[in-house]
Image: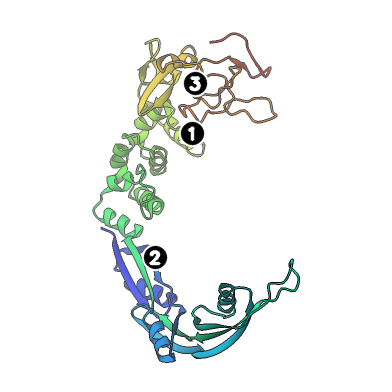
Amino acid sequence: MAERIIEVEADSLQEARIKAKSQVPEGLQITSEEILSDGKTSSKAGIADTIEAAFTDAESKLPSDVEIVDRKQHNAPNRKVVTVEAFEGQTARAQVEQSFKFMGPRIESMKLKETGRKGFLGRGKKPNTYEIQVFEPAWVTVVYNKKARIRVNLAESPEHWARRLKEKKDYRALAEINNSKDYDEPFHWRKRDIANRILVESGAEAVDHIIEELATDGVGSADLAEVLVTIGDPKAVPILRKKLDRGEFSAYISQVGAIRKFVEKYPELAGEVEMVECAICGKTRPVTETDYTQLEGKLNRFCKDTCWEKRGRIIGSKDGVGCPYYTKDRMCTAGRAPARAPAPSHCTFSLKIGPSYIFCNVYKIHPFDPLRGLYLGKRR
């Protein structure tokens, strides 16, 4: 169901929100709100030669569709003569202009009333005296209220989305939400939780569809596996055993135990252990005896006992160029805690798949002995 946008207007933001909720069609839900007008009281100032013209000036600045609630007069038009002492006429004008409490005074005329004295060597100086005729215009404000106005975005509610798919028995679509990477989609996580609850309630009827989605190796494999374990249908054992052997659930500590326990209940259904080829030595051996790396979608498996630490050969080897963890003294410092003995830690810079300063997938480094806390002299 496509997203929609509606705009509503009311006397206050609270009333506008209530009004917006009342206009939401069935099956949709508000996802975001934009305030176009807060509905609060505001004012505009007007300045002119007369009171009437000042109010006209202020009202010309008002937004459209507002309600005027008050008109205030702050200053009536006034013409007066002020006397100022200053050594120069320009200085006298500036003094007059600065003495008014708001902008807009107009100097109509200025004349020298009394000439001062220059004095001698700075002594006996006296400023000129000026008479300045000033016109002070009218100053008013118009107070107004503008209706509160909001724009809200609507999207299909997760409950309606899940109910629609359930009625169609589209269990594959419900399972797909686990592998979706569109995390900014409205209600993504709520949809996933509701979908998985429906899948569990649907039981054996949904199992084949869940297995098909699990076979795509998406980001939600562990969650889909957990759903299958909760349903408890032995039909899921082969694919769960295969993924366990591959180590695909090893990062999900809270789930892998239950998955393994379920699989071990049906050893007769597990099938043969998958055989894979090592990317370095080419030897074919059980997948459980290998480990893997994945870079830009390409997966490579290596013999755990002989080839795992040599895996940098297929990626290439440089001399630390560009790596922020490789120091000038040819040491890898990935994951090292300051002022502490180094401990193995994942490097977040290169491949994000497990290198530490014991070994590196990209660069040749000095091997590290974690028991003695020393780098060994022999280089790989």
Query: Looking at the rendered structure, which numbered label has been put on residue 321?
Result: 3
Earlier sequence position, callout 1 versus callout 3: 1
Q: Name the amino acid, label 1.
A: Ala
Q: Name the amino acid, label 2.
A: Glu
Instruction: Please give the name of the residue rendered at 51% of the width and 31% of the height, measured from the top-left corner.
Output: 348
Q: Is residue 133 visible?
A: yes
Separation (CA) of disc 1 from disc 3? 31 Å
Earlier sequence position, callout 2 versus callout 1: 2
49 sits left or right of 333 in the view: left
**Image coordinates for residue 118, horizontal then vertical, percent:** 68, 72
- Of badges 1 and 3, the one in the foreground is 3
**Image coordinates for residue 152, horizontal then vertical, percent:** 35, 66
Q: Which residue is mark 1?
A: 251
**Label 1 CA crowd tier, 10 Å (few <14, some 14–19, many 20+):** few
Q: Residue furthest right?
A: 123
**Label 2 CA crowd tier, 10 Å (few <14, some 14–19, many 20+):** few
Secondary structure category for the residue under label 2: strand
Closer to the camera in the image, 311 or 197: 311
341 sits left or right of 355 in the view: right
